Image: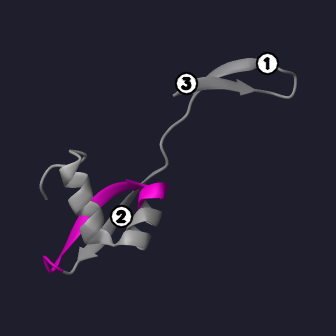
Amino acid sequence: MVGNHVSHSKRRVKRRFEINLFKRKFYWPEENRWIHLKVSAAGLRLIDKKGLSSCLKEAIENGLIKNI
């Protein structure tokens, strides 16, 4: 997404709004291995809430990631 950075004097400069991504390593107990994922801050909260397995299953069904 693109927008403007507006200073105190109301000068406008183009800027980009980037996704808040993190590189994280998760332990997947069903597969007995570690996996590396790039997840957003909202994705981290979702994994904490639902669990890694259910989030991966939903992401594969929705076509967000390929089979791991």
- The image shows residue 23 at horizontal and vertical percentages of 37, 58
Q: Which mark is residue 47?
A: none
Mark 2 nearby-residue class (10 Å; few <14, some 14–19, many ≥20): few
Mark 1 nearby-residue class (10 Å; few <14, some 14–19, many ≥20): few
Q: Secondary structure at mark 3?
A: strand
Which badge, 3 or 2, comes first in the chain's sequence? 3
- The image shows residue 24 at horizontal and vertical percentages of 36, 64
Q: Nearer the viewer, residue 54 or 5?
A: 54
Q: Which residue is mark 3?
A: 2
Task: Say whether residue 19 is left or right of residue 64.
Answer: right
Task: Say whether residue 57 is left or right of residue 52.
Answer: left
Q: Residue at 25% x, 53% y: name it.
A: 59
Quarter of the view holding residue 9: top right
Q: Which residue is mark 1?
A: 11
Foreground: disc 3 or disc 2: 3
The region drawn magenta spans 30-43
Q: Residue at 33% x, 73% y: name it.
A: 51
Q: Which mark is residue 24?
A: 2
Which badge, 1 or 3, comes first in the chain's sequence? 3
Q: Residue at 55% x, 24% y: name it.
A: 2
Task: Say whether residue 14 is left or right of residue 28.
Answer: right
Q: What amino acid is labelled 2 in the image?
A: Arg
- The image shows residue 5 at horizontal and vertical percentages of 70, 27
- Indicate whether residue 15 is drawn in magenta: no
Q: Secondary structure at mark 2?
A: strand
Q: What amino acid is labelled 1 in the image?
A: Arg
